[in-house]
Amino acid sequence: MAAIDCGTNSIRLLVCETPAEPVVREMRVVRLGEGIDATGQMSEAALARTFAALDDYAATIREHGAARVRLCATSATRDAANAEVFAAGVRARLGIDPDVVTGAEEAALSFAGAVRGLRSEPAWPVLVVDLGGGSTELVLGGPDGVTAGHSMDVGSVRLHERHAFSDPPTAAEIEACVRDIDAHLDACPVDPARAATVVGVAGTITTVAAAALGLTAYDADALDQQVLAVDDVHAAIDRLLAMSVEERRALPFMHPGRADVIGAGALVLRQVLRRSGVDRLVVSEADILDGIAWSLLDRPA
């Protein structure tokens, strides 16, 4: 089977028998949501980048003979006036309609992917923080599943564009961005303070974790299941915010397509952790992509 997560900043593919046994896991930064906060539409250039990645993914899916395919599109596609152009492109390349999931569905998929991937029993309840390019999902749950979830329209790309960060961002720009994030958290029905464990997923958080660990290359195996002191996470965020885009891009673990927007995304993580009151962050490489794969397994064939 093949699962595809099409987000605001990246598009990812997982080909597997089960999520615990991946055959192929790929990621491309395509910035599908570029400019969407201002224009309400996906640009032709962003669609072209995304369709080029899907052409390659379709070839990989055929090569491995994956019979069941699900593509979930999230924040950028929910917000776009020209979403049908994207849907037609997906049908032409994969022969399926994209599932444009709601914020609640996105939250449930993120929770399933992150929690089913944990190797040891966490302290409950668990808050999963899925920090994307266009939105951030906060999902609270226990051993029997999700009890509360919410998708906020704050993510690394959206906030970076909305607040027109300088290079590096000024203190005033950071303060304005934090006020924006806090306003969304104030309105969020999921209170981070209810969590006993916080699990962070997706590229912004794993990259911040790589910075906290001082990795000499991005190493998914080294990052998965890491338990980091929150003070170390805050220190890594401060270092990233103080850097220019060029300096971030030179970091050995930094994907070049993430270097300009990671500062804005890292601020979301910082504010959630501050409100949670926990002193440790669990980092998981399993996320919504794994949740999409689990959903294929859980469906009748």
Image (spheres, helix red, strand yellow):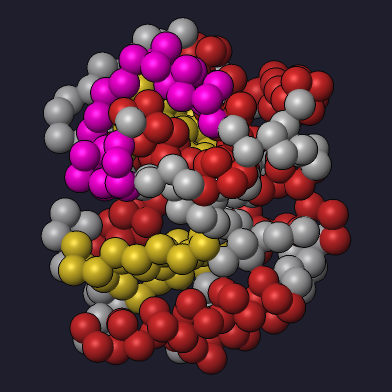
Say which residue appears at 29% left-offset and 41% top-offset: 216
- Occupied quadrant, residue 4: bottom left
Against 191, residue 211 (above or below) is: below
Range shown magenta: 215-240
- In this rendered view, identify the residue nearer to me: 64 or 99: 64
Please give left or right for residue 54 compared with residue 217 in the image. right
Name which residue lies at 39% across and 17% down.
232
Residue 162 visible to the viewer: yes
On the image, the x and y values in percent for residue 164 come to 80, 42
> Where the N terminus falls, by quadrant?
bottom left
Closest to the observer: 130 or 214? 214
Q: Quadrant of residue 168?
A: top right
Q: Residue at x 48, y 18 (%)?
A: 234
Residue 219 is one of the magenta-drawn residues: yes
Q: How many marks?
A: 0
Q: Is residue 299 visible?
A: no
x and y percentages locating residue 85 in the rendered image: 69, 81
Residue 119: where, in percent of width, then height?
A: 15, 35
Does 135 sit above or below residue 243?
below
Q: Quadrant of the C terminus?
A: bottom left
Q: Residue furthest right?
A: 39
Q: Nearer the viewer, residue 18 or 256?
A: 256
Q: Residue 198: say if magenta.
A: no
Coordinates of residue 228 in the picture (x, y in percent): 31, 21
Q: Residue at x 29, y 89 (%)?
A: 62
Q: Is residue 82 left or right of residue 57?
A: right
Asked where in the image residue 51 lies, by quadrant, the reply is bottom right
Q: Is residue 18 above or below residue 153?
A: below
Whether residue 226 is situated above or below residue 36 in the rendered picture:
above
